[in-house]
Amino acid sequence: MNTLVGAGFILATGQMEPRLFDLDLQLIADAALMIIAVFALFLIASKMLFNPVRDMMQKRQDKIKGELDSAARDMEDAAKLKADYESKIKNIDKEAEAILSEARKKALANENRIIAEAKEEAARIIERAGTEAELEKKKAADDVKREMIVIASMMAGKVVNSSIDAAVRDSLIDETLKEIGESTWLS
Protein backbone atom coordinates (compact mmCIF):
# COMPACT_ATOMS: atom_id res chain seq x y z
CA MET A 1 0.00 0.00 0.00
CA ASN A 2 1.15 3.31 -0.88
CA THR A 3 0.82 6.10 1.57
CA LEU A 4 0.88 9.62 0.67
CA VAL A 5 1.92 12.02 3.36
CA GLY A 6 1.14 15.65 3.08
CA ALA A 7 -1.79 17.33 1.50
CA GLY A 8 -3.90 14.31 0.62
CA PHE A 9 -5.51 11.34 2.29
CA ILE A 10 -4.65 7.76 1.66
CA LEU A 11 -7.30 5.68 0.08
CA ALA A 12 -7.72 1.96 0.69
CA THR A 13 -7.31 1.18 -2.95
CA GLY A 14 -3.98 2.65 -2.97
CA GLN A 15 -4.63 5.24 -5.58
CA MET A 16 -4.80 8.87 -5.14
CA GLU A 17 -7.86 10.66 -6.16
CA PRO A 18 -7.77 14.26 -7.00
CA ARG A 19 -9.33 16.40 -4.23
CA LEU A 20 -10.73 19.81 -4.29
CA PHE A 21 -8.55 22.02 -2.06
CA ASP A 22 -7.36 18.85 -0.39
CA LEU A 23 -10.60 18.57 1.56
CA ASP A 24 -11.76 15.25 2.77
CA LEU A 25 -14.41 14.17 5.24
CA GLN A 26 -12.11 14.07 8.23
CA LEU A 27 -10.95 17.65 7.64
CA ILE A 28 -14.51 18.86 7.20
CA ALA A 29 -15.58 17.02 10.38
CA ASP A 30 -12.65 18.48 12.32
CA ALA A 31 -13.41 21.96 10.97
CA ALA A 32 -17.11 21.58 11.90
CA LEU A 33 -16.17 20.42 15.41
CA MET A 34 -13.75 23.31 15.69
CA ILE A 35 -16.47 25.78 14.63
CA ILE A 36 -18.95 24.26 17.12
CA ALA A 37 -16.30 24.36 19.87
CA VAL A 38 -15.45 28.00 19.10
CA PHE A 39 -19.15 28.90 19.02
CA ALA A 40 -19.69 27.07 22.33
CA LEU A 41 -16.70 28.90 23.84
CA PHE A 42 -18.10 32.17 22.50
CA LEU A 43 -21.50 31.44 24.11
CA ILE A 44 -19.89 30.46 27.40
CA ALA A 45 -17.56 33.47 27.31
CA SER A 46 -20.52 35.65 26.37
CA LYS A 47 -22.54 34.39 29.33
CA MET A 48 -19.68 34.49 31.80
CA LEU A 49 -17.63 37.44 30.58
CA PHE A 50 -19.39 39.60 28.03
CA ASN A 51 -22.78 39.82 29.76
CA PRO A 52 -21.32 40.91 33.14
CA VAL A 53 -19.13 43.42 31.35
CA ARG A 54 -22.14 44.65 29.36
CA ASP A 55 -24.19 44.88 32.55
CA MET A 56 -21.37 46.74 34.29
CA MET A 57 -21.03 49.09 31.33
CA GLN A 58 -24.82 49.62 31.24
CA LYS A 59 -24.90 50.34 34.98
CA ARG A 60 -22.01 52.73 34.60
CA GLN A 61 -23.69 54.43 31.66
CA ASP A 62 -26.95 54.71 33.66
CA LYS A 63 -25.06 56.08 36.65
CA ILE A 64 -23.30 58.67 34.50
CA LYS A 65 -26.59 59.60 32.84
CA GLY A 66 -28.23 59.91 36.26
CA GLU A 67 -25.40 62.09 37.53
CA LEU A 68 -25.62 64.28 34.42
CA ASP A 69 -29.39 64.59 34.87
CA SER A 70 -28.89 65.38 38.55
CA ALA A 71 -26.24 67.94 37.67
CA ALA A 72 -28.59 69.49 35.12
CA ARG A 73 -31.39 69.68 37.72
CA ASP A 74 -28.96 71.15 40.25
CA MET A 75 -27.88 73.73 37.69
CA GLU A 76 -31.52 74.64 37.02
CA ASP A 77 -32.21 74.87 40.75
CA ALA A 78 -29.10 76.98 41.23
CA ALA A 79 -30.19 79.29 38.40
CA LYS A 80 -33.64 79.63 40.01
CA LEU A 81 -32.12 80.30 43.41
CA LYS A 82 -29.78 82.86 41.90
CA ALA A 83 -32.69 84.61 40.21
CA ASP A 84 -34.67 84.52 43.47
CA TYR A 85 -31.75 85.94 45.44
CA GLU A 86 -31.15 88.65 42.89
CA SER A 87 -34.80 89.66 43.01
CA LYS A 88 -34.67 89.55 46.81
CA ILE A 89 -31.57 91.74 46.77
CA LYS A 90 -33.41 94.24 44.58
CA ASN A 91 -36.41 94.04 46.91
CA ILE A 92 -34.15 94.42 49.94
CA ASP A 93 -32.92 97.74 48.57
CA LYS A 94 -36.52 98.85 48.14
CA GLU A 95 -37.47 97.55 51.59
CA ALA A 96 -34.45 99.25 53.16
CA GLU A 97 -35.43 102.52 51.50
CA ALA A 98 -39.01 102.11 52.72
CA ILE A 99 -37.81 101.35 56.26
CA LEU A 100 -35.49 104.36 56.21
CA SER A 101 -38.28 106.55 54.88
CA GLU A 102 -40.62 105.31 57.60
CA ALA A 103 -37.92 105.91 60.23
CA ARG A 104 -37.40 109.44 58.92
CA LYS A 105 -41.14 110.10 59.09
CA LYS A 106 -41.29 108.78 62.66
CA ALA A 107 -38.24 110.82 63.65
CA LEU A 108 -39.76 113.96 62.12
CA ALA A 109 -43.07 113.28 63.89
CA ASN A 110 -41.22 112.74 67.18
CA GLU A 111 -39.23 115.91 66.62
CA ASN A 112 -42.40 117.90 65.93
CA ARG A 113 -44.12 116.36 68.97
CA ILE A 114 -41.15 117.14 71.23
CA ILE A 115 -40.96 120.72 69.91
CA ALA A 116 -44.71 121.18 70.44
CA GLU A 117 -44.45 119.79 73.99
CA ALA A 118 -41.48 122.06 74.69
CA LYS A 119 -43.41 125.08 73.39
CA GLU A 120 -46.42 124.16 75.52
CA GLU A 121 -44.18 123.71 78.56
CA ALA A 122 -42.49 127.06 77.86
CA ALA A 123 -45.90 128.71 77.50
CA ARG A 124 -47.03 127.16 80.81
CA ILE A 125 -43.82 128.32 82.50
CA ILE A 126 -44.23 131.84 81.11
CA GLU A 127 -47.88 131.88 82.15
CA ARG A 128 -47.01 130.59 85.62
CA ALA A 129 -44.21 133.18 85.90
CA GLY A 130 -46.63 135.90 84.81
CA THR A 131 -49.20 134.71 87.34
CA GLU A 132 -46.59 134.57 90.08
CA ALA A 133 -45.33 138.03 89.11
CA GLU A 134 -48.89 139.34 89.23
CA LEU A 135 -49.38 137.75 92.66
CA GLU A 136 -46.09 139.20 93.87
CA LYS A 137 -47.13 142.59 92.50
CA LYS A 138 -50.46 142.38 94.32
CA LYS A 139 -48.72 141.22 97.48
CA ALA A 140 -46.25 144.08 97.23
CA ALA A 141 -49.11 146.52 96.63
CA ASP A 142 -50.95 145.12 99.66
CA ASP A 143 -47.80 145.47 101.76
CA VAL A 144 -47.38 149.06 100.62
CA LYS A 145 -51.02 149.77 101.47
CA ARG A 146 -50.58 148.29 104.92
CA GLU A 147 -47.46 150.38 105.47
CA MET A 148 -49.26 153.46 104.29
CA ILE A 149 -52.16 152.72 106.58
CA VAL A 150 -49.81 152.21 109.52
CA ILE A 151 -47.95 155.44 108.71
CA ALA A 152 -51.17 157.32 108.15
CA SER A 153 -52.53 155.97 111.43
CA MET A 154 -49.43 157.05 113.27
CA MET A 155 -49.52 160.50 111.75
CA ALA A 156 -53.17 160.84 112.36
CA GLY A 157 -52.66 159.62 115.91
CA LYS A 158 -50.01 162.24 116.54
CA VAL A 159 -52.03 165.01 114.98
CA VAL A 160 -55.18 163.98 116.75
CA ASN A 161 -53.52 163.55 120.08
CA SER A 162 -52.06 166.95 119.96
CA SER A 163 -54.99 169.12 118.93
CA ILE A 164 -58.16 167.42 117.89
CA ASP A 165 -60.89 165.66 119.74
CA ALA A 166 -62.12 162.13 119.00
CA ALA A 167 -64.86 163.00 116.48
CA VAL A 168 -62.60 165.15 114.38
CA ARG A 169 -59.89 162.54 114.64
CA ASP A 170 -62.14 159.78 113.24
CA SER A 171 -63.27 161.95 110.34
CA LEU A 172 -59.67 162.79 109.47
CA ILE A 173 -58.68 159.12 109.51
CA ASP A 174 -61.59 158.24 107.25
CA GLU A 175 -60.74 161.01 104.81
CA THR A 176 -57.06 160.02 104.75
CA LEU A 177 -57.91 156.39 104.19
CA LYS A 178 -60.25 157.30 101.38
CA GLU A 179 -57.65 159.49 99.70
CA ILE A 180 -54.81 157.03 100.19
CA GLY A 181 -57.00 154.07 99.33
CA GLU A 182 -58.24 155.39 96.01
CA SER A 183 -54.86 156.38 94.66
CA THR A 184 -53.05 153.33 96.11
CA TRP A 185 -55.61 150.77 95.04
CA LEU A 186 -55.64 152.12 91.51
CA SER A 187 -51.90 151.87 90.99
Image (tube, rainbow, N blue to C red):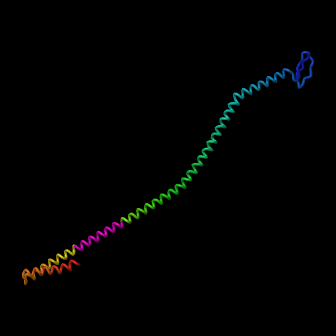
In this rendering, would 73 be left or right of 26? left
* Percent x, y of residue 111: 41, 64
Q: Residue at x 92, y 20 (%)?
A: 17
Magenta: main secondary structure equals: helix
Up the image or down, 127 lies above or below 54; here it is below
- The quadrant in which residue 90 appears is bottom right
Q: Residue at x 31, y 67 (%)?
A: 124
In this rendering, would 114 be left or right of 48? left
* Percent x, y of residue 47: 70, 28
Up the image or down, 72 lies above or below 45; here it is below
Depth check, front residue: 94 or 14 = 94
Q: Residue at x 20, y 78 (%)?
A: 184
Q: Quadrant of the N terminus?
A: top right
Q: Quadrant of the C terminus?
A: bottom left
* Percent x, y of residue 52: 68, 31
Work out which residue is located at the far bottom of the displayed protein and give it: 163
Q: Residue at x 92, y 22 (%)?
A: 18
The residue stretch that appears in magenta: 118-138
In this rendering, would 57 be left or right of 166? right
- The quadrant in which residue 106 appears is bottom left
In this rendering, would 75 be left or right of 139? right
* Percent x, y of residue 91: 53, 55
Residue 132 magenta: yes
Depth check, front residue: 3 or 58 = 58
Depth check, front residue: 60 or 84 = 84
Number of numbered discs present?
A: 0
Residue 2 magenta: no
